[in-house]
Image: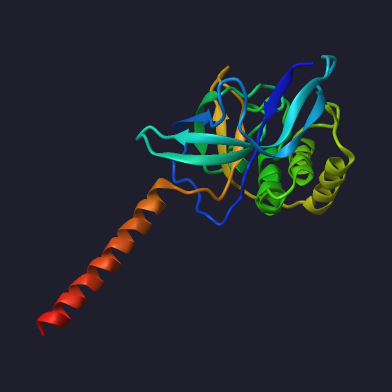
């Protein structure tokens, strides 16, 4: 069976990307060209309709995001696309509102409201899932389960991973949220979701604020010395 890489996300206590809707960025896998740089997760078996099962990665995947202005940052995502393979370099349209912008029209076989449900699961559990392989795999499986009809795919995974998936889904209810959605160009890769990551604008504002503070302190010191 061939191996396919599916998604990942590390939710940390950071800020969200400030890229505007319709911005185009490049996601490049941080691993070598002959492999993948992945975080926590498990290899699982995915069956899609009548096609032969494939060995797929369920969990986090590491990327280097490059914006049109050449700003770069490390990024960890979860997959929100069962029907396209991830590529080492992907051209992506970025949206801040996956709840409304991931639709059955642009995400094959997804169900209505899939983006909002996936975002809630990721926002709620990704930070904890990043500590354990089975938790991360379970979170990815839960995302797929809530995005697609039960007839769209089948999955065979370690028991602990499926138990975590069941636990996560049991808390979902009607909850919905939003997050940063990376929509792959046609034939250019696999859609991803990421939240709570550094944003260029916020980083610059923070740096500017620190410069202002240090500048004020320096001027205050000089004033005190002169006086």
Visual colour scheme: rainbow
Q: Position of residue 178 (x, y in %)?
A: 61, 47
Residue at image position (52%, 24%) is 89
Query: Among all residues in the image, which is located at the extreme bottom?
Result: 227
Quadrant of the image containing the N terminus: top right
Q: Quadrant of the C terminus?
A: bottom left
Q: Between 8 and 50, which is closer to the camera in this rendering?
A: 8
How many numbered circles are shown? 0
Give above or below for 180 relative to 213.
above
Spot occupied by residue 105 in the image (x, y as percentages of width and height):
64, 27
Q: Position of residue 61 (x, y in %)?
A: 63, 35
**Residue 49, quarter of the rendered image:** top right
**Quick check: 48 above or below 130?**
above
Q: In the displayed structure, does residue 69 sit left or right of residue 74? A: left
Residue closest to the eye, 221 or 193: 221
What's the residue at 10%, 81% (across, down)? 226
Given the current orientation, which residue lies at the most extreme left position? 226
* Residue 215 as seen in the image, left or right of residue 93: left
Residue 111: x and y in percent read 74, 33
Residue 149: which quarter of the image?
Answer: top right
The residue at 62%/46% (across/down) is 10
């Amino acid at each position: 069976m061939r191996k396919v890489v599916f998604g990942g996300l590390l939710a940390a206590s950071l800020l969200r990307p400030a890229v505007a809707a319709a911005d185009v960025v490049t996601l490049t896998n941080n691993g070598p060209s002959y492999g993948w740089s992945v975080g926590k997760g498990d290899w699982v078996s995915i069956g899609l309709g009548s096609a032969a099962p494939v060995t797929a990665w369920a969990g986090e995947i590491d990327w280097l995001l490059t914006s049109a202005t050449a700003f770069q940052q490390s990024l960890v995502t979860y997959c929100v696309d069962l029907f396209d393979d991830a590529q080492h370099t992907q051209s992506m349209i970025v949206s801040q509102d996956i709840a409304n912008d991931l639709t059955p029209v642009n995400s094959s076989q997804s169900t209505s409201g899939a983006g909002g449900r996936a975002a809630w699961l990721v926002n709620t559990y990704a930070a904890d899932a990043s500590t354990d392989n089975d938790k991360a795999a379970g979170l990815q499986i839960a995302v797929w389960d809530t995005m697609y009809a039960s007839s769209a795919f089948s999955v065979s995974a370690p028991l602990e991973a499926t138990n975590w998936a069941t636990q996560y889904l049991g808390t979902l209810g009607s909850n919905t949220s939003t997050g940063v959605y990376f929509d792959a160009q046609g034939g250019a890769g696999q859609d991803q979701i990421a939240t709570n990551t550094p944003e260029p604008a916020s980083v610059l504002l923070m740096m500017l604020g620190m410069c202002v503070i240090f500048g004020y302190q320096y001027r205050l010191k000089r004033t005190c010395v002169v006086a």
